[in-house]
Image: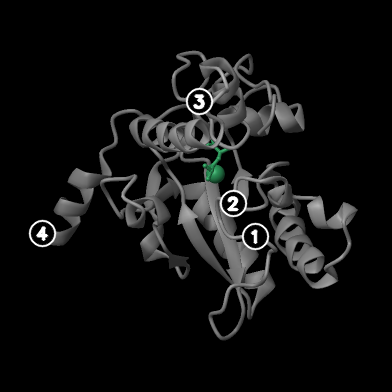
Amino acid sequence: MTAAEFEHVTLRENGDPLTDLTRYPFECHPSYFHRGLSPTNAMFARQAVAELLVDIQRALAPLTFKIWDGYRPRRVQRTIFDDHLATLRTRHPDASEDELRKKAEVFVTDPGSSRRIPPHATGGAVDLTLLDAHGRELDMGTPYDHFGPESAALYFEDNARNPAVRNNRRILRDAMTGAGFRCDADEWWHFDFGNQIWAAHHGAPAACYGEIEDFDPTIWSVVKRSG
Ligand SMILES: C[C@@H](N)C(=O)N[C@H](C)C(=O)O
Ligand SMILES: [Zn+2]
């Protein structure tokens, strides 16, 4: 999300609740839990987001969604940012801390700013791909969270060496943006709905999803197991 400005956008929270994505007909693969960067494998998103995904998936049948991440509390955003920063520090030992933070922000929102709400902390952002009828991921040209130029949403439009990848990305992007999502320019897998970056992109007068701070999916999954 290189240089995107969105913190100025007015917020009118509409109270749409978070909903458990594992109760929907998607394949949920909580990537940050599996990589040890999140304490929980719970996966949530705003209800309207989940319902839109159901509609999109129905229209794309037999393709289905594989979801890697949805609601992400700011503390998990911090863990991911710090992890990425540490990788960059090793890769660029001569870079200043300022340069490293700028590099890191191309792919991971810096959670340190109190003015900027990380898009995933609103429950209005999802990271996902498409599976074919046999449950195999469509070839999107890079793995999830490949932090390089090839992950740019339009990379294979401009570099048409691989028309199959270009078409697969088109299918995902067109379906998501057709339903109102914003597609991230740097990350083919990241889509926003209802939050400030989405409102800035669409020129909407306000965003309807603000930060959700007091939701602890760790506690929630304990309740779910015993309930
Ligand atoms: C880290 C990556 N999966 C992601 O979600 N990036 C967005 C832009 C973010 O961190 O807000
Ligand atoms: Zn994302």
Separation of marks 2 and 1 at Cα, in angstroms: 6 Å
Check residue 226 in the rendering and tell me which mark sits there, or answer none.
4
> Disc 4 vs disc 2: Cβ atoms closer than 8 Å?
no
Cβ of disc 4 within 8 Å of ligand 2? no
Q: Is residue 227 visible?
A: no
Q: Amino acid at mark 3?
A: Asp
Going from N to C along the chain, the mark reached first, 4 or 1, is 1
Query: Depth check: 214 or 206 in front?
Result: 214
Going from N to C along the chain, the mark reached first, 3 or 1, is 3
Q: Label 1, on which residue?
A: 142
Q: Label 3, on which residue?
A: 110
Label 4: state its secondary structure. Answer: helix
> Disc 3 vs disc 4: Cβ atoms closer than 8 Å?
no
Going from N to C along the chain, the mark reached first, 4 or 2, is 2
Give the quarter of the image for residue 205. Answer: top right
Quadrant in which the C terminus appears: bottom left
Label 1: state its secondary structure. Answer: loop
Label 3: state its secondary structure. Answer: loop
Q: Amino acid at mark 2?
A: His
Q: Residue at x 60, y 41 (%)?
A: 193
> Disc 2 vs disc 1: Cβ atoms closer than 8 Å?
yes
